[in-house]
Image (cartoon, grey):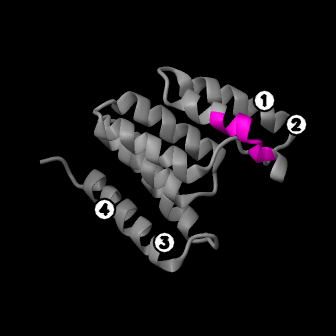
Amino acid sequence: SADDFKPSVQVQALSMIDEPGGAQKVREMLQDARKKDPSATLFPEATVNIIGYEFLQGGDNRSAVEVMKLNAEAYPNSPNAYDSLGDAYLAAGQKESALAASKKCLELLQTDTKDPQQQKDAIKASAEGKVKQLSAPVQ
């Protein structure tokens, strides 16, 4: 609903996510909001995805994982959120979690009707690459 995106809540959530420990605070805000409205969202998926990758580029893998986990929790049917979470886990050296997130991404892609085909193909290639890399026998 339009109410979800009251600019003040969105701006507050996005500025919080950028702060240390902020992803956890926003997760709590999201859980509270979902008690009232199970489909509540506090932030746009794409924006939070960018914040997660900014943490990755800055070498803060722990924050990246927290941010990507928050995004996947907020958008549980988004293949892209899980692919990004897989990237963050991989960067953080959490291989089992990266593999699980990538497999979840591929599973969600099968029923994804929201993303354009070109984006779905790119997400699929990214997730399959991680699955292949992570499933390879250790030399």
Q: Does the magenta stretch include residue 5?
A: yes
Q: In this view, does 134 lie above or below 94?
A: below
Residue 120 has which mark? 3
Q: Are marks 1 and 2 in contact (CB under 8 Å)?
A: yes
Residue 32 has which mark? 1
Task: Say which amino acid is labelled 4.
Answer: Gly
**Residue under label 2:** 36
Distance in Å between CA atoms under marks 3 and 1: 32 Å
Residue beneath the point at 78% across and 29% down: 32
Judging from the image, what secondary structure is the residue with disc 4 in?
helix
Foreground mark, 4 or 2? 2
Q: Which of marks 4 and 3 is nearer the N terminus?
A: 3
Whole-percent x, y for residue 99 in the image: 39, 49
Judging from the image, what secondary structure is the residue with disc 2 in?
helix
Instruction: Please provide the residue range marked out in magenta.
Output: 4-11
Q: Quadrant of residue 56?
A: top left
